[in-house]
Amino acid sequence: MPDDAVEVDSRRTLTPADRAVRAARVSVVSNSLLVAVKLAAGLVMGSVSVLSEAIHSGMDLVAAGIAFYSVRQSRRPADEHHPFGHGKVENVAGTVEALLIFAAAIWIIVEAVRKLIRGVQVEALGVGLAVMGLAAVVNILVSRHLFRVAREADSVALRADALHLSTDVWTSAGVFAGLGIMALTDYHIVDPLAALVVAVLIIHAAWDLTREAFLPLMDTSLPEDEQQVIQEIIARHSSDFVNFHRMRSRRAGPERHIDLHLVVHGDHTVAEAHALCDAIEREIEGRFPRTDVVIHVEPSSPGRRTPESPPRGPS
């Protein structure tokens, strides 16, 4: 078999988890290059807005490194010490990333205010325009790739990394616009003002990330739309049971955990009840991969089910 055929075949067999790890590696490489270029340009220009972008990309590089680590760790199977798996590694990683972004935003604000007070003179505006334009294009391409793979792999950490880079697109565009205004008007005060706008956008993105990453650590329920889908799947089998209740759900990184009580007809055999539970579990896991479903079966008195007591949802 030709080597190129083997390569194509290997790509076809990549799992979503494998693609997530590769995407995280791409993010690490692209962020490393952008940090170096922005930092060099900012120092040459004496521009706080470009330096703030370098710091922002530096935080993204740390975030990308954390994402790369966490998407690998979260895919590890359950073991003796982690019987529910390692999915929450991604949530912890996302929370750490958010805190780092907050810290970066504070540094940018302090530096921008200092420049406003002392004054600023920016040099080599053409270099800054070229660097910011390049950064925006690179981040558009990489963030789109990360968002796509994050959806396929259902990865919180990878989505957080993609969110960082998409924010970078807007901040790079803002700094680009600020540099353009300075080139046209010679109003260099625009530089620290642009940095402050960047800081506000970063804080907004960090807050959204904090909510998404931290709340699952508190074992909050799955989103309402996902719970609705699960209830609809269960309802498809309503002719085989009386009702269900006490449905609970939570998420840990890319993993979902669901448990519920299912009331079956009292004359069902153990084998019939088991087959019913297996069918429901398979459908839920087919709709939401990497989902652990636990169903507690309760018997109803024989012949108890009537049209007046239809199957009902969680209570």
Image (cartoon, helix red, strand yellow):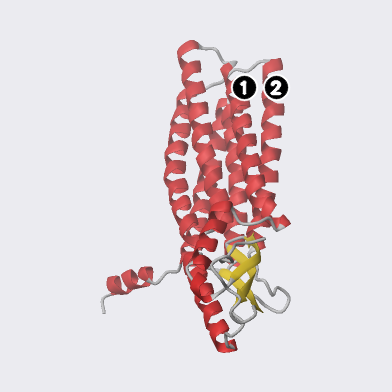
Q: CA distance from mark 1 to mark 2?
A: 7 Å
In contact (CB < 8 Å): disc 1 and disc 2 = yes
Instruction: Determine whether the residue tagged by mark 1 lies in a helix, strand or loop.
Output: helix
Q: Residue furthest left?
A: 2
The residue located at (60%, 62%) in the rendering is: 313
On screen, residue 197 above or below 246: above
On screen, residue 210 above or below 296: above
Mark 1, residue position: 192
The amino acid at mark 2 is: Val
Quarter of the C terminus within the rendering: bottom right
User: Does residue 76 appear in this view?
Assistant: no
In percent of width and height, residue 244 lies at 61, 68
Q: Which quadrant of the structure image shows residue 308?
A: bottom right
The residue located at (48%, 27%) in the rendering is: 176
In this view, the residue in front, 294 or 102, is 294
In percent of width and height, residue 139 lies at 47, 42
The amino acid at mark 1 is: Pro
In this view, the residue in front, 308 or 286, is 308
In percent of width and height, residue 166 lies at 50, 41
User: Does residue 8 appear in this view?
Assistant: yes
In percent of width and height, residue 163 lies at 54, 44
Crowd band around label 1 with a 10 angstrom C-alpha radius: few (<14), some (14–19), many (20+): many
Quarter of the N terminus within the rendering: bottom left
Instruction: Determine whether the residue tagged by mark 2 lies in a helix, strand or loop.
Output: helix
Q: Which quadrant of the structure image shows residue 194?
A: top right
The residue located at (60%, 71%) in the rendering is: 293
In this view, the residue in front, 149 or 1, is 149
Mark 2, residue position: 113
Sequence order check, earlier mark of 1 and 2: 2
The residue located at (61%, 43%) in the rendering is: 58
Crowd band around label 2 with a 10 angstrom C-alpha radius: few (<14), some (14–19), many (20+): some
